[in-house]
Image (tube, rainbow, N blue to C red):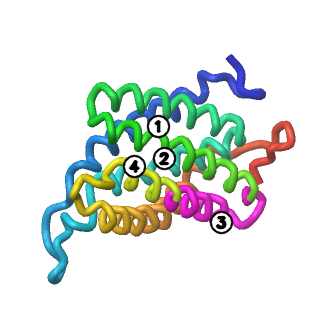
C-alpha cells in the first residue's frame, strides 16, 4: 500500500510507536504521581500518563516533517485503531473511549496545524501544533474519562496540560536531532522546509 510516494512499510515504526504510546498512556493515566512539592500533593495534579502521551506529538510531527501530512494522518489513524483496540482489552472502557476520541481529534488537528506552519522557523510547527493538540486532547480526554467520577479530574487536566507543554518544549531538541539524522527532500508539493 502506498501513501503518496511513501510505502506503508516505511510508516510501520511510527504506527507501532503510536499504538504503544496510547496503550501505555491509557494505563498510566489512572496512576497518580505520589509525593509532595512544598505543600502540594502531586497525586491531585499529575498522573504518569502526562509524561508518556506527549511523545505521540513527537511521532506525529516527525512523520509529518519527513513524509508529509497525508502520511502523518495515516500514522494517526492506524495508531488510533491499534491503541483503542488494545486499550479496550487492557484498560478501562471509559478511558479507552475518551482516549480514542481525544486522540483522534487532537492528533489530526496537530497534523493540520503543523502542515500550515511547516515552512516557518524549525521549532514553530512542532511546538505550536503540540500546544494546540495538547489543549484539545486534555480538555476532551479528562472531561470524557473522569467527569462525575469524584476523582480530581480538573486538577489532573491542568497538571497534565502543563506537563504536556513542558514535554513539548523538552522534545524540541529531540525533534531537531531527528531532522538532522533523517533529512527530508521535497516531494509532491509537501517540501520538508
> Image height check: is 12 above or below 61?
above
- Cβ–Cβ under 8 Å for marks 4 and 2: yes
Residue 6 marker:
none
Is the residue marked by circle 4 packed among few (<14), some (14-19), or many (20+) residues within 10 Å? some
Q: Earlier in the sequence, mark 4 or mark 3?
A: 3
Placement of 119 over or under 14, stated as above or below: below
Residue receiving disc 3: 124
- Which range is magenta? 117-135
- Give the CA separation, mark 4 to mark 1: 21 Å
| 78 displayed left or right of 65 | left
Q: Earlier in the sequence, mark 4 or mark 1?
A: 1
**To which residue does mark 4 refer?**
144
Instruction: Please give the name of the residue rendered at 62% of the width and 44% of the height, measured from the top-left corner.
Output: 182
Q: Residue at x 71, y 21 (%)?
A: 2
Give the secondary structure at mark 1.
helix
Q: Nearer the viewer, mark 4 or mark 2?
A: 4
Label whose residue precedes the other's in the sequence (3 or 2): 2
Residue at the far bottom: name it: 38
Q: State the residue at coordinates (43%, 33%).
A: 19
Q: Secondary structure at mark 4?
A: helix
Indicate the position of residue 66 as horizontal and vertical percent values: 67, 42
Of residues 24 and 152, the one nearer the viewer is: 152
Q: Position of residue 98 (x, y in %)?
A: 41, 43
| Helix, strand or loop for disc 2 | helix
- Could you say which quadrant of the image residue 121 lies in? bottom right
Q: Earlier in the sequence, mark 4 or mark 2?
A: 2
Which residue position holds label 1? 18
Q: Label 3, label 2: how many angstroms apart (C-alpha)? A: 23 Å
Real-space Cα distance between discs 1 and 2?
14 Å
The disc placed on residue 102 is 2
Q: Does 159 lie within the magenta span?
A: no
Amino acid at each position: 500500500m502506498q501513501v503518496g510516494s511513501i510505502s506503508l512499510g516505511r510508516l510501520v515504526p511510527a504506527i507501532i510507536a503510536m499504538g504503544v504510546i496510547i496503550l501505555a498512556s491509557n494505563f498510566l493515566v489512572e496512576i497518580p504521581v505520589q509525593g509532595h512539592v512544598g505543600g502540594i500533593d502531586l497525586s491531585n495534579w499529575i498522573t504518569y500518563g502526562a509524561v508518556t502521551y506527549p511523545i505521540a506529538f513527537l511521532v506525529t510531527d516527525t512523520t509529518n516533517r519527513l513524509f508529509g501530512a497525508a502520511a502523518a494522518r495515516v500514522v494517526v489513524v492506524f495508531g488510533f485503531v491499534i491503541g483503542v483496540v488494545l486499550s479496550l482489552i487492557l484498560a478501562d472502557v471509559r478511558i479507552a473511549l475518551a482516549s480514542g476520541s481525544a486522540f483522534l481529534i487532537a492528533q489530526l488537528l496537530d497534523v493540520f496545524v503543523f502542515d500550515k506552519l511547516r515552512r516557518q522557523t524549525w521549532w514553530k510547527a512542532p511546538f505550536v501544533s503540540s500546544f494546540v493538540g495538547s489543549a484539545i486532547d486534555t480538555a476532551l480526554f479528562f472531561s470524557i474519562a473522569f467527569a462525575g467520577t469524584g476523582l480530581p479530574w480538573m486538577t489532573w487536566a491542568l497538571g497534565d496540560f502543563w506537563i504536556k507543554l513542558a514535554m513539548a518544549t523538552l522534545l524540541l531538541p529531540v525533534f531537531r536531532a531527528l531532522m538532522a539524522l533523517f533529512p527530508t527532500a521535497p516531494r509532491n508539493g509537501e517540501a520538508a522546509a
